[in-house]
Structure formats: structure tokens, C-alpha cells
Amino acid sequence: MTKFALVLAASALTATAVFAQDAAPEVVDTDANGTFSLVEVQAVYANVTEETFKAADTDASGELSAEELKAAVDAGAFAA
């Protein structure tokens, strides 16, 4: 019975982790330039302001790289 409970708990944790990954919305690079503009980000994260976007743009390029976007999302700076 203990093995069954451990397997069930592990399965539940795995399912929760997979579901959580699927829950994050995906920003689309509509102009296919390899970066994400404020407009592209706001299409998914409507509450992102210019100020929040600039804070996430750590290299001050005016666009977010995939790494900058992921860091902002992971940090909770962008709320869907």
C-alpha cells in the first residue's frame, strides 16, 4: 500500500508540473525577426506596460530576446 501511495503522489506531482508548463501562454514573434516587441508581448500579456517591458529589456535593445522574455515571465513580471 505504501508503494502505491508513493507512486500516486509522484504521478500527481508530475502531472501538476506538466500542466503548469502548458498553462503559460506563448508570445508569437509575428514579424519573425527573432525578438519580441512590446506589441507582440502585449498580445498575450495585456497588462505589460512600457515601463515593465523596458525593465525586462536588460540589454536595452528595444526588443526582448527569448531569454529576456523567459526571465520576465519566470520572475512573474508579466501577468496574463
Image (cartoon, grey):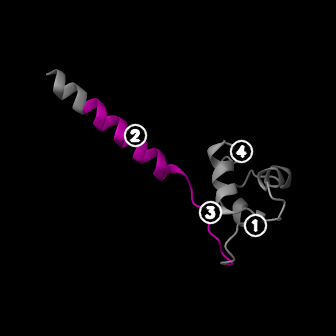
Q: Which residues are magenta?
A: 8-31
Query: In the image, residue 27 lies at what x, y percent?
Result: 62, 63
Does the CB distance between marks 2 and 1 fall below 8 Å? no
Residue, disc 2? 16
Q: Nearer the viewer, residue 22 or 68?
A: 68
Horizontal side, residue 9 vs residue 65: left or right: left
Does the CB distance between marks 4 and 2 fall below 8 Å? no
Residue 12 seen: yes
Q: Nearer the viewer, residue 80 or 76?
A: 76
Residue, disc 1? 37
Q: Estimate the spatial distance between the alpha carbons at disc 4 and disc 2, rounded to whole Å.
A: 22 Å
Residue, disc 4? 77
Q: Identify the amino acid type marked 3.
A: Val
Mark 2 burial class by Cα count in 10 Å: few <14, some 14-19, many 20+: few
Mark 1 burial class by Cα count in 10 Å: few <14, some 14-19, many 20+: many
SS of the residue under disc 4: loop
Q: Residue furthest left?
A: 1
Query: In the image, residue 23 lies at what x, y percent?
Result: 50, 50
Q: Nearer the viewer, residue 26 or 60?
A: 60
Query: In the image, residue 13 lies at what x, y percent?
Result: 36, 35
Q: Estimate the spatial distance between the alpha carbons at disc 2 and disc 1, rounded to whole Å.
A: 31 Å
Does the CB distance between marks 1 and 4 fall below 8 Å? no
SS of the residue under disc 2: helix
Residue, disc 3? 27
Q: Main secondary structure of the magenta part?
A: helix
Q: Estimate the spatial distance between the alpha carbons at disc 3 and disc 4, rounded to whole Å.
A: 14 Å
